[in-house]
Image (spheres, helix red, strand yellow):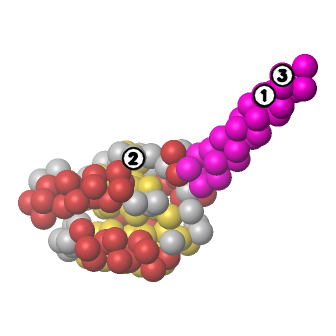
């Protein structure tokens, strides 16, 4: 009987340890999208910026060569960092692009805690983007 109680205690302790480990940052990290999120309009951008601590907004155009070159880089950033990547087509969201004073593409705006914190214009390499994100993480 004492052995049964001891076995139950060990099992419960193991369950508690597993639950504690998954309740930490691992679980919250899994809620961050691992792929870029397409944004259509101000409400979607506001919701995304409010929901996630770090959001890298990529203002792009389909016809833009540097934007196409940047696409795999931002996909990697979305998959491998703690930042949510939001893709905003400036042709479909002209008013939103104007609101953020996007005059050239690609333009990247990093939101930290709901506020624009960094702005990068033109082609960026992965190391530069990681550095900017880590600064605000």
Within 10 Å of the Cα at label 1, are there few (<14), some (14-19), or many (20+) other Cα atoms? few
- Which residue is at a point 84% across and 25% down the rendered structure image? 3
Secondary structure, magenta segment, majority class: helix
Occupied quadrant, residue 134: bottom left
The image quadrant where one finds the N terminus is top right
The answer to the question of whether label 3 and label 2 lie on touching residues, with beta carbons closer than 8 A, is no
Magenta-tinted stretch: 1-28
The answer to the question of whether label 1 and label 2 lie on touching residues, with beta carbons closer than 8 A, is no
Task: Please give the residue where the numbered disc 3 appears in the rendered image.
Answer: 4
Residue lying farthest top?
Answer: 1
Q: From mark 3 to mark 1, how far is it between C-alphas?
A: 5 Å
Dot label at residue 7? 1
Within 10 Å of the Cα at label 2, are there few (<14), some (14-19), or many (20+) other Cα atoms? some
Q: From mark 1 to mark 2, how far is it between C-alphas?
A: 40 Å
- The residue mark sitting in front, 1 or 2, is 1
- Which residue is at a point 59% across and 46% down the rendered structure image? 27
């Amino acid at each position: 009987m004492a052995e049964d109680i001891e076995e139950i205690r060990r099992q419960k302790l193991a369950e508690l340890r597993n639950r504690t480990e998954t309740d930490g940052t691992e679980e919250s990290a899994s809620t961050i999208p691992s792929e870029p999120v397409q944004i259509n309009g101000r409400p979607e951008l506001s919701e995304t910026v409010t929901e996630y601590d770090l959001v890298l907004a990529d203002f792009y155009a389909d016809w833009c060569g540097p934007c196409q070159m940047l696409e795999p880089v931002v996909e990697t950033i979305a998959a491998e960092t703690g930042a949510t990547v939001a893709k905003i087509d400036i042709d479909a969201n002209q008013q939103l692009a104007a609101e953020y004073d996007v005059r050239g593409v690609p333009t990247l705006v990093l939101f930290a805690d709901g506020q624009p914190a960094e702005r990068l214009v033109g082609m960026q390499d992965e190391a530069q983007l990681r550095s900017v994100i880590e600064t605000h993480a």
